Image (spheres, helix red, strand yellow):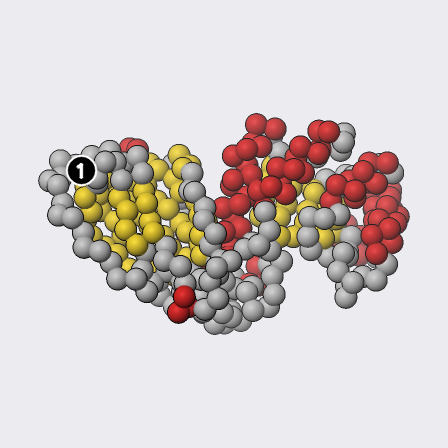
Amino acid sequence: QAWRKYASLGTAVNWEIWNEADRKEVFKGGQSGFFSIWVHTAQLLRKLDSQCILVGPSTSKHDWVQEFLKVAKEFDVEPDVVCWHEEATKADVAGHMNGSVESFWQDGTDRRRIRIMQTVSSARQYVPGDMVILMAGIQDAYRATGWRMVEEELAFKTHHLATDAGEPRAIMLAMQWVQGLSGTPCKVEKTDSVQGLAARDDSKRMLEIVLGRAKGKAATKPAVEAEVKLNIRNLPGQAAHLKITRIAATGAAAATQPSTLVDRDFEIKNGEIKFPLNHFHPGQALDIKVELLRNAPAMPTIPAATRT
């Protein structure tokens, strides 16, 4: 009935057969029960429309993916899009994606699209730093597997991006920062709690970095948060101007105006700029714009920052 409705409208649809069936509170039939439902439903959909797009297994974790693809291959109902959900701040997103791409080749379950969705508790579904970390993991995976020509994409619930009144939430601002990165991608070395993405535009002498921060394994409350130290390496010239802007985590409420933490010139020493990032707390996202200054005189040494 659902297929007939959308077929009559001419609407393009991606068909997901159950959502997070690996969670007992969602589906009590277990792995074998879900696989049986998938095979039966996928065969029916392909009989109705041989070109329909199937998405699966759409599990809350990566655990079932490889076995699912083997069963789907055996019954000739492989998904067009291999999808599962990741908890951004805990799971090894890049490792899961790279492992899946490798298994496509090893197991003969050759697929060309991977879709990752964020799975989070209701308390974290609007956290801007988490989204940045998830997107950084996807970029890391593509850096390692892009040569295999597998399309790796992020999917999200659009109603998470704005309030009922249409005001953007903090998560939307963070995604806009990431999507606004242009130029040559640069590597950001992740830590226990911080991960991000970066790109440089040599024609504009600009480097932009977007960071997200999670709680981390060592931190238990803001009073004992580990200090985050920014270290930008391989910079030419004598000085650069840094503007660092922060998005606070405001929950389901509308985003507040991003605040400026740093807006000043820095001396480049031995190709580096490094200093503590004060007031960068778990859940928040940072945008760091670095503009290399032409013929700039050496800047005075910056004072040691106070730990927060």
Q: Position of residue 185 (x, y in %)?
A: 42, 37
Quarter holding the C terminus is: bottom left
The image quadrant where one finds the N terminus is bottom right
Q: Up-down: is 11 above or below 296?
A: below
Frontmost residue, 253 versus 235: 235
Task: Count neighbours of disc 1 (C-alpha within 10 A) and say few if under 14, some if 14 to 19, many if 20 or more.
Answer: many
> Where does the image place residue 245, in percent across and percent down from the top left?
32, 57
Percent x, y of residue 273 = 26, 44
State whether residue 77 appears in this view.
no
Q: Secondary structure at mark 1?
A: loop
* Residue shown at 62% from the left, 34% from the top: 150
For the image shown, how many numbered marks are present on the structure? 1
Q: Residue furthest left?
A: 297
Q: Is residue 213 left or right of residue 37?
A: left
285 or 174: nearer the eye? 285
Q: Which one is nearer the viewer's eye here, 230 or 79?
A: 230
Residue positioned 75% across, 60% down in the render:
23
Give 282 or 258, whichever is nearer the viewer: 282
Could you say where residue 230 lies in the image, as x and y percent from the top left?
33, 49
Q: Which residue is labeled 1 in the image?
A: 238
Relative to residue 16, is residue 130 drawn left or right?
A: left
Dot 1 amino acid type: Gln
**Is residue 300 rendered to the left or right of residue 151?**
left
Q: Which of the 4 image quadrants contains residue 26?
A: bottom right
Tell me if I can see residue 23 in this picture. yes
